[in-house]
Amino acid sequence: MTILESLSYTHLAVGLIAYSILKPLYGLHVNRKKAIATGLPYVYTAVYEWSMIWLLVKEIAWPILKAIRLGWLVKYSRPSWNFDAKNKIHEDLGDIFCVVSPGGLSIFVGDPDVICEVTKKRTKFPRPVKSFVKVMGYFGPSILSSEHDEWRFHRRVTNKTFTEPNHKVVWFDSLYQASAMRDEWLSGLDNLTSNKEGIIHKMGSDCMKLALHVVTLASFGVQIPWTAQKEAIPAGYEMSFREASEFFLEHIAIMAYCPQWLYKYGPKLAQTAGVAAKNMRRHMMELIQIEDEKLQNGEDGKNLLSAMLQSDDPEAQAKGGSVYDTASVSKTGVRKDFVMGNSAIFLLAGHETSARSLEYALFLFAMHPDVQDEIFEEIDEILEGVGNIYDLKYEEVFPKMVKTNGVLYEATRLFPVTPYIPKSTEDVIDSWFIYKDRRVDIPPESMVALNAIGVHYNEQYWPEPYKFKPSRWYQTQKQESLGISPQDTLQLSGSNTDAARLYRRGTYLGFGEGPRNCPGKRFAQVEIMATFLALFREHRMELVLEPGETHRDAFDRAWAALQRSRMVITLNLFEEIKVKLVPRK
């Protein structure tokens, strides 16, 4: 090697090192200037929280950085930092603050009025659809992966699919699945040691199983028995529909964070996820075809798939001179890509979010015997004189479950499935909101996080925010079931009651806020209310005490485990909390 070549390699190495140092410093400088221009308080972090590389490695990198005392570098981008901080971060920095990093600018919002303003300005603060397209775009366009006019079309059509006939399907299958789950718990088949003490060792996975079975029937008309045996794999497939769905939904983070080439050349887990996604898509297309044929024969499956295939919305139709070819259009004239994309979203949202909400609600229920006694009064009143639980009619019973619904609302206040709701400004150059009587302009390409966990733990809106108090919801739930509007509730409840406080828009984000709130809210409520009826008709749930423990000791241990929950796609509990079903006295 000549001296000239040696110098060239040296210059290249020095240049690369200089670039790797100067580029993030320049990014930090640029984003700091943006933060200063907003007039909001700001803090620094060394890594952009939504960086794809960081999302992939943060669970490994954070413990290492913490061990070598460099954790402070990523204080505001470490795993689940905002869930751990609760409202303390807003107490320290204000209701709205910026996080400045080399890779971008993030604005965290904990002010209810600004939250409402941001959610109303859909075109100025769109969802970061690029991320959602990466996760679910494989299945087709959907309500989650669209914005602006396209989103309005998806919302308009999907809203019509969540009908009362479909909710009846959810109600009865939830009763069936929950009853079977209860029987398994009581039989000891769930118990790893088979001592038949009713100890529940896999609450999380059982809640996921129940939610998957319910949403599969409600969405596709496919009923899966609780004790379903391993299915035969159809010719031409590598996985059955249940296997593909379970694996895909369990490993959805791989779809979110990994490049697609990993599905073919990456580790076995990534390759299997790719196979699951491919098989799930093929199975769904086949189910669409089957439902399409049924509709042609005059059969209505009363499921979400059937409802979408019957859409008469002009934008859902693809007839005549459509750009869509014949194979991509159902016999009812509806675009299959639209049906496929939204069906996948129903499966994901109806599975993951319902299951996590149910899991947290059950653990909190077990921790609070006094709350159970209140709920049992309501359940006993509903079940009085009822011999067969399947005789209960959804439309008659659900509106009466005021207190039980309060348990769900309070569980999702303390442990929202999504601790923050992501918005962005993307390339919008006129995004702004009013805060403290002044206009705050948000620069393009900024992430705006509506901090649900922060506002949920703000004692200005929620007295004793760390306390599990379903009773704070009872009056509101009753009024809601009577059709009284939120504005009327404010007048009826008085300004100092919890019921009035909770209807200050923007203080509760458990099911979203504004036009883009959760369209499947009633679906989840019906599923979880039916599950509570089936589980607690004759039983209660208790924490399992370790030797020498009191209930208070077990409570503190369980609460600490809940507080160590972590974000993946949704908030997840990774530690075991042992509970058991026992007969009610």
Image (cartoon, rainbow, N blue to C red):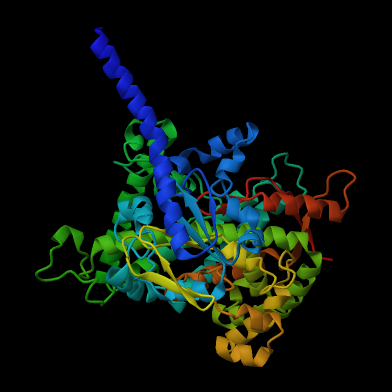
Quadrant location of the C terminus?
A: bottom right
Q: Is residue 544 left or right of residue 430?
A: right
Question: Where does the image place residue 483, in percent across and percent down from the top left?
Answer: 55, 89
Residue at 15%, 62% in the rendered image: 324
How many labels, in total? Answer: 0
Q: Is residue 165 left or right of residue 277?
A: right
Question: Which quadrant of the figure has residue 539?
Answer: bottom right
Quadrant location of the N terminus?
A: top left
Question: Where does the image place residue 373, in percent across and percent down from the top left?
Answer: 79, 71
Residue at 56%, 74% in the rendered image: 112
Question: Where does the image place residue 556, in percent across and percent down from the top left?
Answer: 80, 53
For residue 579, say whether it is visible: no
For residue 368, say whether it is visible: yes
Q: Nearer the viewer, residue 575 or 317?
A: 575
Question: Which quadrant of the figure has residue 343?
Answer: bottom left
Q: Nearer the viewer, residue 504 or 360?
A: 504
466 in relation to 112, above or below: above
Q: Residue furthest right?
A: 548
Q: Nearer the viewer, residue 500 or 460?
A: 460
Question: Where does the image place residue 581, in percent across and percent down from the top left?
Answer: 75, 57
Q: Residue furthest top?
A: 1
Q: Nearer the viewer, residue 169 or 70?
A: 70
Residue at 35%, 63% in the rendered image: 342
